[in-house]
Amino acid sequence: MSLPSLLHYLSFSGINLELKGENIRVYYNDIIPSTVILQEIRINKLKLITTLRNDKEVKEAGFIVGIPGILYTLTLDKYNILYIEKTDDKWESRVETYQKERKKVVKIKLIDTGNTFDFVLYKTKRYLNRILQKA
């Protein structure tokens, strides 16, 4: 099972994961995770830890987790949305600009791309600090 599929299944099954140091705690309400799902969690442990850390870090920076480990968003104002997204094996940070009464993007500003999440998040935070200083 791919990591996004596993995270999707866990989310919709009411199974929550919490990072405790280098361990993952599994919490559930009604549905007890099957041995197959628990095995998938064990197999994907390192990726899950990375995803949970990334999710925590972006939440602290004010982002919303769109798809855990893949897509994060931050609404800058009425017409601008900042995205951090993993495509293939690269991370990309961009701002999409919309106009009133138009559903399509009218402008895309690429902030940065990189091989690591930490690098792109660092560049994105610097960009946010610059635009906040101008405001």
Image (cartoon, helix red, strand yellow):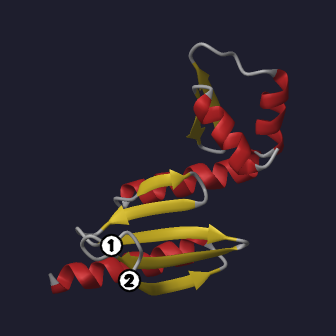
Is there CB contact under 8 Å for labels 2 and 1?
Answer: yes
Judge from the rendering whether residue 50 lies leftward or rightward of residue 98; answer left or right.
right
Q: Residue at x 25, y 83 (%)?
A: 131
* Local SS, label 2: loop
Q: Which amino acid does label 2 sit on?
A: Val
Crowding at label 1, few (<14), some or many (≥20) Cα neighbours within 10 Å? few
Q: Can residue 82 be seen from the camera position used here?
A: yes
Q: How far apart are marks 2 and 1 (CA)?
A: 8 Å
Q: Residue at x 39, y 71 (%)?
A: 82
Res 26 quadrant in image: top right
Residue 102 numbered tag: 1
Judge from the rendering whether residue 124 lies leftward or rightward of residue 55; answer left or right.
left
Crowding at label 2, few (<14), some or many (≥20) Cα neighbours within 10 Å? few
Front residue of 96/31: it is 96
Image quarter where the C terminus lies is bottom left
Point out residue 43 in the picture as x, y percentages from the top left corner.
83, 43
* Local SS, label 1: loop
Given this view, does label 2 or label 1 mark the residue nearer the observer? 1
- Residue that protrudes farthest toward the top in the picture: 30
Res 62 quadrant in image: bottom left
Compared to residue 131, the image places residue 53 above or below, namely above
Residue 17 numbered tag: none
Front residue of 17/2: it is 2
Q: Residue at x 48, y 61 (%)?
A: 72
Residue 106 numbered tag: 2
Image quarter where the N terminus lies is top right
Point out residue 35 in the picture as x, y percentages from the top left corner.
83, 23
Q: Which residue is drawn at 45% across and 85% down?
A: 111
